[in-house]
Amino acid sequence: MLETLKDCLQCGACSNICPAGVEINAMVRNARASYAKGLSTPWWLWNILRSRRLTPLLAKLLTGIPGTSGLVWRLLGLTGRTSGDEKVLHFEMPSLAQMPALSRRHFRLLDPGCGVDSGPGPRIALFLGCIQNYLYPEAAEAMVRCLGGKVLVPLGQVCCGMPAWSAGALETAREFALQNLRALETANADFIVTGCAACASMIKEWPKLFSGKEAERELAVNLADKVREFSRLLGELKVFPFREPRDRSVTVTYHAPCHQRFDLGGVGESEDLLDRMFSDAFRPMPHGCCGQGGLFSIGNPELARKIFEKRLSAWDRTGSSIVVTTCSGCLLQWRAGTAHQSGGPRVLHLAELIDDCSKR
């Protein structure tokens, strides 16, 4: 049973196909909560992620340390293993050759509260998420440019809570959600956009964390109704800020995130955008999980690698030179998994690709 609990990716596929409508991923989360009170991550790491001051400070301290050194992961307490039943509570050492270093220029530290635009059009608040803030700020910056500058970044944002939620640390997820509710409420936005399908999925789960707390639940429902994954917002607003690709030789395929397929109503907007941009040069790839799964790929590196290898085989059959995705975790998995592969694809967030095609 412990291995089953540990090996669940929380992708939502089983719940999506269950003919009886059973939310199997919720059953796994609840079992994790009952058995291990959050499973694998040290309590102090959750405290750091909750703090709007400690998280940037830790990021500054760790910036530039190569992921291959393993030092970051040891400092964060994400390595080691014990015997007996408790082994499920600790992470194995991930494949260090695949671990990226933190970006030297964190998005939120560059220009806090940036992007306010008083011009016409909807008021859009950007929810960054941890990976785009601390690892790939260029993706968030591209997203702001694609949306035409009508974007603001509310201060006080923390982790969306997905890692804690998936691990069964529900009280921690609730604390994350509450901080974000307060931060996003001040934006008074018409839409909340995020470049991460997992973050968008988690924001839509926030109301479930406030059963019995009517005021917080009402605010969570209101904000959940406003959240949009980036490609969906582009389609909804009919924003197409791109031209034809400069390099006609490129071919593109799309990795559809599990959370977008199963929690957010599908991937039609992303694929439609790519089809409009690239026509015959867009080569669809059969859908499948990349094996990232938040903390899953750290706790289960070998299984995550085997899952990802299937995606690599699917990509290879497309013959494409670029892989595009719309989830920060998937972006991390694809970049880490192909970083040392000769002849591998260029891996981009959809916003980066659109932004690149828009520059002349």
Image (cartoon, rainbow, N blue to C red):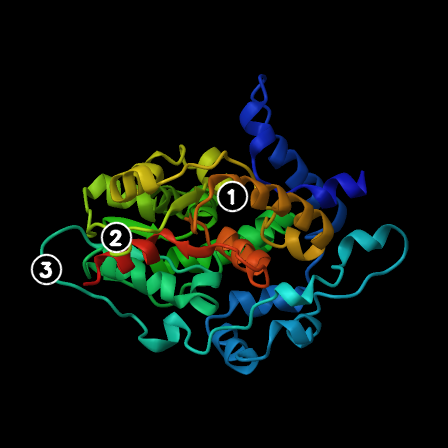
Q: Secondary structure at mark 3?
A: loop
Q: Are marks 1 and 2 in contact (CB under 8 Å)?
A: no
Q: Position of residue 186 (x, y in %)?
A: 29, 60
Query: Nearer the viewer's eye, disc 2 or disc 3?
Result: 2
Residue found at x 59% / y 17%: 20
Apparent side of residue 34 relative to residue 19 in the rendered image (left or right): right
Residue for badge 2: 245
Which label belongs to residue 86? none
Which label belongs to residue 315? 1
- In depth, the one of 49 and 174 nearer the eye is 49
Q: Position of residue 150 (x, y in %)?
A: 19, 58
Count neighbours of disc 3 (C-alpha within 10 A) and say few if under 14, some if 14 to 19, many if 20 or more: few
Question: Amino acid under label 2?
Answer: Pro
Q: Position of residue 14 (x, y in %)?
A: 60, 29
Name the N-terminal-most of marks 2 and 3: 3
Q: Secondary structure at mark 2?
A: loop
Q: Is residue 291 above or below residue 349?
A: above
Apparent side of residue 264 relative to residue 118 in the rendered image (left or right): right
Kindly indicate the quadrant of the structure image that contains residue 70: bottom right
* Number of numbered discs overlaid on the protein picture: 3
Name the N-terminal-most of marks 1 and 2: 2
Count neighbours of disc 2 (C-alpha within 10 A) and say few if under 14, some if 14 to 19, many if 20 or more: some
Whole-Å distance between the Cαs marked 1 and 2? 21 Å
Count neighbours of disc 1 (C-alpha within 10 A) and say few if under 14, some if 14 to 19, many if 20 or more: many
Q: Position of residue 50 (x, y in %)?
A: 52, 65
